[in-house]
Image (cartoon, grey):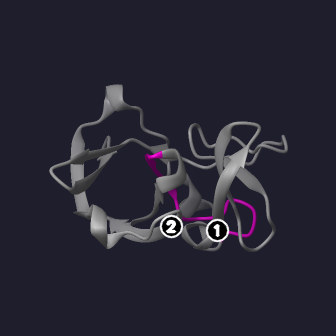
Amino acid sequence: MEHILEQYKSVTKNNVETWFKVGMTTDFPENSGACIKYKTKQIAVYNFKRANTWYAAQNLCPHKMEMVLSLGMIGDKEGIPKVACPLHKKNFSLEDGTNLAGGDLKIATYPVKIENGNVYIGFSD
């Protein structure tokens, strides 16, 4: 399973090579997540309506190695937007993927842009 985890690497806006259209803003639930597929990756997309911001991260939980993060509850911890894994409740930052409880488990994050009602996620491959 480790080989699956290795394909997920965080992307910043500065190193985006492809903006991939994943749907319309109306296709995604408010204050929740949904999963899309890009090549061999499953990506969780979050419409964090309460914060008026969109986020994208790997859907793969690095702890249990299950594709479940799009089903996790989103919120914030001390002002940091986060997702809680539905399997074990570990909290990951939606901004940079860090484990908010400490430790070395981390998730990959991806930039999101909204243009003309379309949602795009940035990838470097």
At x 31%, y 72%, the residue is: 27
Kindly check if marks 2 and 1 are in contact, taking CB atoms under 8 A apart as contact: yes
The mark found on residue 33 in the picture is 2
Give the residue type at disc 2: Gly
Residue 7 visible? The answer is: no
Whole-percent x, y for residue 7 in the image: 48, 54
Location of residue 29 (image quadrant) = bottom left
Query: Is residue 59 part of the magenta span, yes or no?
Result: yes
Query: What kind of element bears circle 2?
Result: strand
- Res 97 label: none
Return the residue nearer the eye: 109 or 7: 109
Going from N to C along the chain, the mark reached first, 2 or 1, is: 2
68 over 103 or under it: above or below: below
Residue 41 located within the stretch drawn in magenta: no
Which residue in the protein does label 1 denote? 72
Percent of width and height locating residue 73? 66, 65
Q: Amino acid at mark 1?
A: Gly
Q: Residue at x 69, y 40 (%)?
A: 98
